[in-house]
Amino acid sequence: MISFNEAIIKVLEYSTLSATARVPILDSLSCVMAEDIISKDNIPFNDNSAMDGFAAMLDDLTGASQANPVILKRYNYDIPAGEAGKFAIDKGFCIKIMTGAPIPSGCNCVVKKEDVEIKGDEVFFFKKCQFFENIRHKGEDIKKGSIVFKKGRRIDPAAIGVLASLGIKDILVFKPPLVGIISTGNELIGIDDKLLFGMVRDSNSYSLASQVKEAGVAYIRYGIIKDNKDELKKAIKKATIECDLILISGGVSVGDYDYIKEILGESGAEKIFWGVKQKPGKPLAFYEFNKKPVFGLPGNPVSVMVCFELYVRPLIRKIMGYENLFRNKVSARAMHSFRHEPGRTEFVRVKLEKDKKGNYNVDLTGQQGSGILMSMAEADGIAVIDENKNEVAEGEILKVFVIKDYSVC
């Protein structure tokens, strides 16, 4: 049995970046760019108006005020957005122009329509203007030939908007892994089944699927596989053919019907580790099978979710090309003392609160048993208790992985 620190090192040492794939930009959300993005255009492509108003020459507006407006002749046409024609402006004249419309030759300012008054073919200007006021310059946002995004940049909605503005309809990304999820156990029944004595509805495949989806990747749920060696072998083989990373919940402990370790060994899978000095999640197993990473997760619902947060999510993020693999961490003061059994790292589910000084306080979500799924539902974070500690004292500072960012905003 190895320590938590040894286990996470082995998981992350295993990973290499996945293959790249070129995908439509709308399918690239939360992926990581596998190439530099260089602009082929200036954005904006040309100088254009930032306001609805009148394009004019700055010299013609000298001295304009509410008391002494400047009067300019108005052309009998205007310039709408999207107009491809080229226009020029003469001294003493102005042109009505719309937001986004190209700036006419000779114009060096745009006056908002709220600051003028139109009388027939004349326009009264009631304020002076600044040089290039209300004009968006060619290349102001992005210059032609510039590196817009560097390889390794996470793709968010704003980045997708920028890519669209550059005329880029698909992009090379680090290919997200497809995750296979298998739930095992004779006691498991489906979500629609009536709960009977001795039976448990399968929650693990749902919580795991949700965690996988939150991590930004797709999954296949293979349903409930009973504790039958042949059926388990078939399901695991199928998952390793179809998926890039496999999660198996249940069957990794030392019970008479815990077959996963035996099946993986018989199938030629390489054991990287089995058993970690931690709570919850002690019987965690990590294998390589058919050149795919396979996690044997404990069957208890809290253990499943905690092990995903600690090991699976960081591995997924590394495969996807992320630099920051782990959840954000904060330091928080324990509001109460509580006992800890030395010899293994403990991960307790906690609520976070900010005090008036902006410091975090932390308290347990209640009972911490590995079957108390509500302890995860109510948790803002997972606090890490060092394996050598005997207890946590009131006021002690703990490291907390934040799993619900909105709760500490």
Image (cartoon, grey):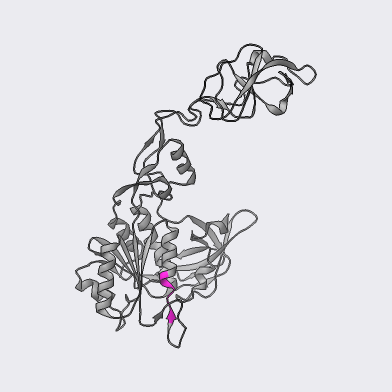
- Report whether residue 386 is seen: no
Is residue 364 shown above or below 117?
below
Is residue 10 shown above or below 135?
below
Which is more toward the observer, 186 or 376?
186
Direction from residue 134 to residue 319 in the image, left or right: left
Direction from residue 173 to residue 52 in the image, left or right: right
Where does residue 337 sit, x and y in percent of width and height? 55, 70
Q: What is the residue that sits farthest to the top in this orientation?
A: 91
Which is more toward the observer, 150 or 8?
150
Which residue is at 30% across, 60% downward?
244
Q: What is the residue that sits farthest to the bottom in this orientation?
A: 197
Decide whether residue 204 is among the magenta residues: yes
Figure label count: 0
- Report whether residue 314 is seen: yes
Where does residue 394 sit, x and y in percent of width and height? 56, 67
Is residue 51 shown above or below 62?
below
Which is more toward the observer, 280 or 384?
280
Where does residue 259 sit, x and y in percent of width and height? 28, 78
Which residue is at 53% across, 66% downward?
379
Direction from residue 51 to residue 255 in the image, left or right: left
Where does residue 360 sit, x and y in percent of width and height? 57, 58
Q: What is the residue that sits farthest to the right in this orientation?
A: 67
Quadrant for the C terminus in the image: bottom right
Quadrant for the N terminus in the image: bottom left
Which residue is at 33% across, 57% downward?
177
Decide whether residue 136 is among the magenta residues: no
- The part of the chain drawn in magenta is 200-205
Quadrant of the rendered image containing residue 67:
top right
